[in-house]
Image: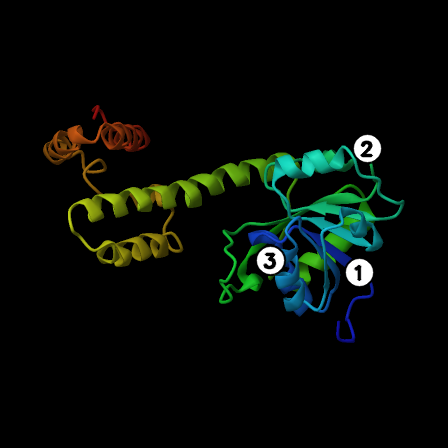
Amino acid sequence: MACMKFLNSQTIVIAGAGNVGWHLAIALSKAGWNIKNIYSKNIRNAKKLASRVNSIATIDFHEIYSADIIIFCLPDDVLLQKLKTIYIPAGKILLHTSGSLGIDVFNSISVNYGSLYPLQTFKKGNDDLDFSTIPVFVEGSNKKTISILQKLAKSISDSVQQANSQQRLFLHIAAVFACNFSNQMYCLAEEICKKHNIDFQLLVPLILQTAMNTKKILPSLNQTGPAKRKDMAVIGKHLEILSAYPELKDMYSSITNSIFVRNNEDGHA
């Protein structure tokens, strides 16, 4: 590993070389933090990320103990399993990046612990991602940890806020609706297009405009379409066509009824 000067004296281990760990490690490295080790059960993944952040790859979980700050970027179930068997030397700061886990998962093994939660969808290879625009939510067990969290978060993001575990959980639920479920809708639209020889890319301007509208108008004020205008003729025609696709028909009806309810309309799809 090449010798370099770090802006921050504290060392960091990133435990997990998946999508979140990949982007967080790169952002912290660019901000001047010393990423001492990258841990992954897959040495190839660890080495690939370590080479990007001037770090050392490891598949030995015990090597994470050597750093001052340990950031767990692992799936919730994997992290919970790991925490049953690890011993952390006193003084280490333990952080996770989970939206759904409370920080109290650490309280039996450390006094300095918390959460560093970047609210974004991550994919390896998306090098155009600007981490400074990503909201980062922090929560710490004590003043020392909160101070470190603020320093970490503000070094990589222009939008840093404190959020307790319950607030973060509801943020995560909202994010699933806004991101993951929306993408599933895109997947279903893609299937419909493919079955009927339509280029899905024709829908992209519509998708982008809908997303851009949320920057200016609340989604609750931005609903359009047949359910919003209570166009039962169009809705009926759509449902008739979708009779050949029961899963899509049920989903169409459920979402249409949700729009009815939220717009105080009478009717049932």
- Among numbered discs 2 and 1, the one appearing first in the sequence: 1
- Among numbered discs 1 and 3, the one appearing first in the sequence: 1
Q: Position of residue 253 (x, y in %)?
A: 24, 28
Q: Position of residue 158 (x, y in %)?
A: 60, 62
Per the image, the residue denoted by label 1 is 11
Residue at disc 3, secondary structure? helix
- Residue sitting at 59 percent across and 41 percent down? 99
Residue 188 located left or right of residue 52: left
Q: Nearer the viewer, residue 75 or 105?
A: 75
Per the image, the residue denoted by label 2 is 108
Q: Position of residue 248 (x, y in %)?
A: 25, 33
- Residue sitting at 19 percent across and 44 percent down? 195
Mark whose residue sits in front, 1 or 3: 3
Q: Residues within 10 Å of mark 3 (few under 14, many from 20)?
A: many
Residue 254 located left or right of residue 238: right
The kind of residue on which mark 1 rests is Thr
Q: Is residue 147 visible?
A: no
The label on residue 22 is 3
- Residue sitting at 73 percent across and 34 percent down? 105
Residue 89 located left or right of residue 145: right
